[in-house]
Image (cartoon, rainbow, N blue to C red):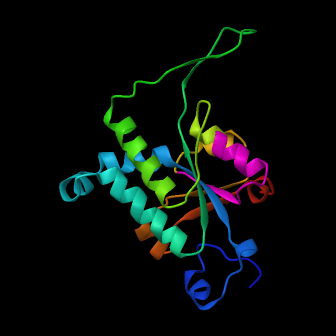
């Protein structure tokens, strides 16, 4: 096969994949962190639910031969009046979300996964990375990635959905042809 995808897992395990054939995805890390923090089951079974969720998903994708770029939120954008520039305000950093975000960033860096902080919205940076062909697609459950101009977005991402081939892939070039 010419290109390895995360959805041909069995074939990939049998093949020797050269680095240039490895796909790279931008991950909207905020979505994964929020999923971990709001999950009652995760909170009951793990001291750091967001860290556990990010770790298990990251390791599965890395073990499948997929390269990742984790994208985190930046400052809060405040829209200016028409004709004025937008301003950026520092976000509150003492929340459970930001504590989990910093822990996940540290862990990902230790694992060798690049972590980049967006100027504002993480979805916008994910889309830009995809537009410029730095990554092959974006993993996010937030449709804003498409609105910001991503070419390929994978949604409904979870390990269970990955195992059951229920992850949905949206390719803008195919959507426009409809």
On the image, which quarter does residue 128 sit in? top right
* Magenta stretch encompasses residue 41: no
Looking at the image, is 137 positioned above or below residue 10? Answer: above
Looking at the image, is 160 positioned above or below residue 17? Answer: above
Q: Nearer the viewer, residue 5 or 166?
A: 5
* Segment tinted magenta in the rendering: 125-140
Q: Position of residue 167 (x, y in %)?
A: 53, 65
Q: Position of residue 57 (x, y in %)?
A: 45, 63
Q: Is residue 45 left or right of residue 13?
A: left
Q: Is residue 32 left or right of residue 42?
A: right
Q: Position of residue 73 (x, y in %)?
A: 53, 36
Furthest residue toward bottom: 14
Quadrant of the frame with the C terminus: bottom right
Q: Nearer the viewer, residue 109 or 132?
A: 109
Furthest residue toward front: 110
Q: Position of residue 113 (x, y in %)?
A: 55, 57
């Amino acid at each position: 096969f010419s290109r390895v995808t995360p959805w041909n897992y069995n074939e990939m395990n049998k093949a020797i994949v050269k680095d240039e054939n490895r796909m790279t995805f931008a991950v909207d890390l905020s979505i994964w962190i929020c999923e971990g923090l709001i999950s009652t089951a995760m909170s009951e079974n793990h001291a750091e639910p967001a860290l556990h969720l990010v770790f298990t998903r990251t390791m599965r994708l890395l073990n499948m031969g997929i390269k990742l770029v984790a994208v985190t939120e930046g400052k809060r954008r405040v829209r200016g009046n028409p004709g004025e520039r937008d301003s950026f305000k520092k976000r509150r950093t003492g929340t459970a979300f930001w504590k989990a975000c910093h822990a996940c960033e540290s862990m990902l860096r230790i694992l060798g996964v690049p972590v980049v902080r967006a100027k504002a919205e993480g979805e916008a940076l994910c889309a830009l990375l995809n537009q410029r062909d730095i990554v092959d697609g974006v993993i996010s459950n937030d449709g804003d990635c498409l609105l910001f101009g991503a070419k390929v977005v994978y949604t409904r991402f979870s390990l269970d959905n990955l195992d059951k081939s229920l992850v949905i892939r949206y390719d803008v070039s195919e959507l426009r042809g409809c």
